Image (cartoon, rainbow, N blue to C red):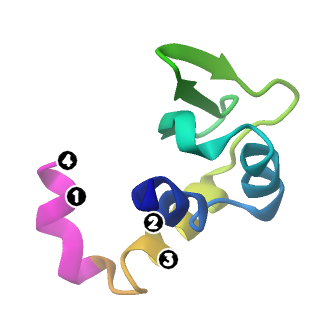
């Protein structure tokens, strides 16, 4: 469960707040795709968050935070998924 909370800390504040109200202990995966609605998997069901589209800037910000502002140092890990 600690991993899901760590992942939630990478999200824009409104999405973090939204997911906090959705029983985060059941969330298995959070999906952010540029130009699309965010979604998450919980209890083997994908749930799409309607009315919210992820921007390129939000993706870049999440990656930058995850990499500790050192994208270059993490490129190989990113390439490997």
Task: Give how far apart the Cα atoms at labels 4 and 2 are.
Answer: 13 Å
Q: Please tell me whether mark 3 sits on a helix, a strand or a loop.
A: helix
Q: Where's residue 30, x and y in %?
A: 52, 39
Q: Residues within 10 Å of mark 1 (few under 14, many from 20)?
A: few
Task: Give how far apart the Cα atoms at labels 4 and 3 are.
Answer: 17 Å
27 relative to 14 in the view: left or right: left
Pointer 2 residue: 63
| Magenta stretch holds residue 79 | yes
Residue at x 62%, y 45% (from the top left corner): 24
Pointer 3 residue: 65
Q: Please tell me whether mark 2 sits on a helix, a strand or a loop.
A: helix
Residue at x 81%, y 55% (from the top left corner): 17
Question: Which mark, by number, is residue 50?
Answer: none
Compare residues 15 and 26 and report the one nearer the observer: 26
Task: Give how far apart the Cα atoms at labels 1 and 2 are.
Answer: 10 Å
Residue at x 19%, y 68% (from the top left corner): 75
Pointer 1 residue: 78
70 relative to 53 in the view: left or right: left
Q: Earlier in the sequence, mark 1 or mark 2?
A: 2
Placement of 20 over or under 41, stated as above or below? below
Magenta segment's dominant SS is helix
Q: Residues within 10 Å of mark 2 (few under 14, many from 20)?
A: some
Q: Earlier in the sequence, mark 4 or mark 2?
A: 2
| Magenta stretch holds residue 58 | no
Residues at circles 1 and 2 in contact by the CB criterion of under 8 Å: yes
Task: Give how far apart the Cα atoms at labels 4 and 1 are.
Answer: 5 Å
Residues at circles 3 and 1 in contact by the CB criterion of under 8 Å: no
């Amino acid at each position: 469960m600690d991993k899901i909370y760590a992942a939630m800390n990478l999200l824009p504040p409104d999405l973090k707040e939204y997911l906090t109200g959705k029983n985060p202990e059941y969330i298995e995966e959070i999906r952010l795709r540029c130009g699309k609605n965010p979604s998450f998997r919980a209890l083997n069901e994908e749930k799409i968050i309607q009315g919210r589209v992820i921007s390129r800037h939000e993706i870049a910000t999440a990656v930058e935070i995850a990499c500790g502002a050192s994208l270059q140092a993490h490129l190989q890990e990113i390439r490997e998924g």
